Image (cartoon, grey):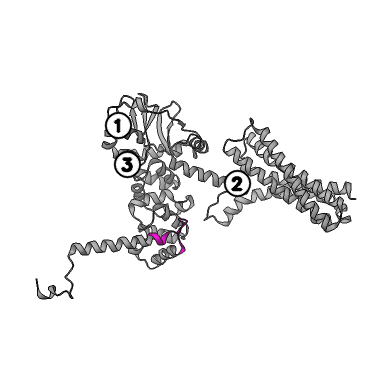
Amino acid sequence: MSRESDDPKIPAPLSDDLKDTLAAALIEDEDEDLEDLALGEDYALTPEFVAMVVDAADRADAERLRELLDALHPADVADLMGFLSPDYREAVLAHANPESLAEILSELDTEIREDVLAAVAPATLAKVLGELDSDDAADVVDDLEADMRAQVLAAMPEVERVAIETSLAYQDETAGRLMQREVVAAPQFWTVGQTIDHVRKDGEELPELFFDIYVVDPSFRPVGAVPVSLLLRSRRDTPLAQIMEPVTEIAVDLDQEEVAYIFDKYHLISAPVVERGGRLVGQITVDDIVGVIHEESEEDILALAGVSDAGRNAGVVEMIRSRLPWLMVNTLTASLAASVIGAFQDEIEKLVVLAVLYPIVASLGGNAGTQSLAVAVRALANRELSAINAMRTIARELSAGLLNGVALASVTGAVLWLMFRDVGLSFVFGAALVINLVVAALAGALVPLLLDRVGRDPAVSSTVFVSFVTDFTGFFAFLGLAALILL
């Protein structure tokens, strides 16, 4: 060793291995910093991180874009696409890790995914889809244009292509479209040890995520299931038939909302999907159900407002098409309710204060009706309201409406008396308010039940009719009582 290297003031040169270790540590620290910067406390992407992605795309800095995308979970990359214009999406996704691109595509909103898929070559897309479970792959292929779909399917291996085509043959929003065809099944006579050996040996052919081993008979019909946790705790020589548990089968044509209800009611993690003859054709896992519950809840919330999900990238025409029909219906019902005011025009001219007060009666009734309606629609969605308990539910709502009406009438009547010193006006206002809140409670509970009975979605249609009932009743009750008592 030279004299200079022995001098403590002069550091010894770093070895190549140490340089690589330090470089890797610096990269790891930078990745951790990016992960901290990317998401806020609410797990939403921060504006600063989105700005960093846009800046790197503007500079065509491929290395920086890869660093930024690698710091994100595929679900966060999917969220990122929602903040970018189509040109930026194409530029950014071109640098995504090929292994994670499949998961990113499955997480994208439908409208955004359609734009992204149009920019991906069929051969690349066919390779990417091979990384997904059959249900996710079918969901992506379903968003492709007919020509693009044919090219992608033609470029896929036969086994994967058949699985996707079979899934697409089922009706949309059914268990068949929701399920993944990859399952872990074992015959009744197998032991725990044989099953574990099978899982280890054929792991590449098994689903990426599974919770149960389905025990099947010679006709491949499920007769039970063994949770993986129970399998690993059991002795190797234990027959599966001794430890298997009963299963809740899902019919392949069952609506996805019904499937979500079954999962919630029986606290399922996974369930086998069977065709008409009872043969096992796939499975549904709880991660798919979480998406269904979110989707159905979102649809109900939008439906209560009389709109459909046009998406964040919807154009003005699509937004108008989704909202205008119910606005037209609302215009008709509002006109009918307003006709009551016209019928009492002379009375309003004689006592102008009526024009100030009748909207208050209608508005309070509308709010009460909306409260009752929300409770009824939720109860119908959760199977808590049916013909069996309908009368009890309606009676409870009527009681609440009556008591709320009396309470509000007492307060508002006292205020009106202090303002106008007119006992008759206070009584008329209070009585009309009680009548309207009782009718609002009745309409809010009864209208969804009737619509559900005739096969209409109560979340979509109820709001307009309940609003009409409360407006009509509020106007008529207040102005009619005023004409009889005050004039």
Frontmost residue, 228 versus 173: 228
Marker disc for residue 157: 3
Marker disc for residue 89: none
Q: In this picture, is 485 found above or below 35?
A: above
Q: Where is residue 346 in the image (x, y as percent from the top left)?
A: 88, 53
| Amino acid at circle 3 | Pro
Whichever of callouts 3 and 1 sits on the residue coming sooner in the sequence is 3
Magenta stretch, residue numbers: 35-47
Q: Left or right? Give the position of 240 relative to 330.
A: left
Predominant SS of the magenta segment: loop
Regarding mark 3 in the picture, which secondary structure is present there?
loop
Name the residue rendered at 44%, 42% in the picture: 288
Give the quarter of the figure containing the N terminus: bottom left
Mark toward the viewer: 3 or 1: 1
CA separation in Å, label 2 and label 3: 41 Å
Does the magenta run of residues contain 41? yes
Q: Check contact, mark 1 vs mark 2: CB within 8 A.
A: no
Regarding mark 1 in the picture, which secondary structure is present there?
helix
| Amino acid at circle 1 | Thr
Residue 460 visible in rendering = yes
Q: Name the residue under label 2.
A: 303
Q: In this picture, is 241 found above or below 60?
A: above
Q: Position of residue 124 (x, y in %)?
A: 34, 51
Mark toward the viewer: 1 or 2: 1
Furthest residue in direction right, as rendered: 487
Number of residue marks: 3
The crowding category of the residue bearing disc 2, from other C-alpha atoms within 10 Å (few below 14, some 14 to 19, many at least 20), is some
Q: Mark 1 points at which residue?
A: 195
